[in-house]
Image: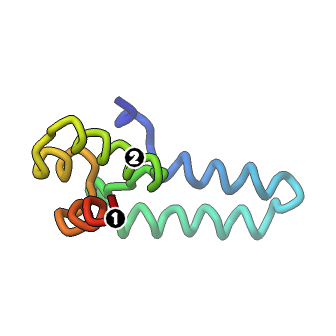
Amino acid sequence: MMRDIDIVEDIFARVREILGDRFAGEISVKLAEEEDRVRQAWGGTEPYVAKRRDRGCIKKMAMDKLNHGAPIQAVVNETGISRAGIYRLLKRK
C-alpha cells in the first residue's frame, strides 16, 4: 500500500514542480511556511482522500451485479451507492 508516502510532501512537491524555478525566493518561503501550517493542523491524523471514480462505470457495475442476483446491501457496500440510489437505478431500468 502507499502509506509510506508522505502525502503533504508529495502535494507540495507537485505544486513546486508546477510553479517551476521562476518562482524562487519569496514564493518558496511562503510554500515552506504553508507546508508547516498544514503539518501543524493535520499532524497525527490520517485524512481520507477518495479516488475520483467514473459514476457511469460504477452505476453499470451496480446494475450488472443486481442483474446477476447480488443482494442490494452487497451492491451498496461494494459500489458506495446509497440504498436509495440503488432503488433509483432499478426504477429507471
**Residue at the top extreme of this rendering:** 1
- The C terminus sits in image quarter: bottom left
Kind of element beneath mark 1: helix
What's the residue at 64%, 64% (across, down)? 31
34 left or right of 45 in image: right
Which residue is nearer to you in this view: 26 or 53? 53
Which residue is nearer to you in this view: 25 or 1? 1
The residue wearing badge 2 is 60
Alpha carbon of mark 2 to alpha carbon of mark 1: how far? Answer: 12 Å
The residue wearing badge 1 is 92
**Residue at the right extreme of this rendering:** 22
What's the residue at 47%, 53% (across, down)? 56
Q: Position of residue 81 (x, y in %)?
A: 27, 58
Amino acid residing under circle 2? Lys
78 left or right of 1 in image: left
Q: Quadrant of residue 38?
A: bottom left
Above or below, 9 relative to 64: below
What's the residue at 32%, 55% (across, down)? 48
Above or below, 68 relative to 23: above
The 10 Å Cα crowd at callout 2, few under 14, some 14 to 19, many 20 or more, is few
Instruction: Tell me the mark number nearer the camera, choosing from 2 and 1.
Output: 1
Kind of element beneath mark 2: helix
Residue 45: image tag: none
Q: Position of residue 73 (x, y in %)?
A: 10, 51
- The N terminus sits in image quarter: top left
Amino acid residing under circle 1? Arg
**Residue at the front extreme of this rendering:** 93
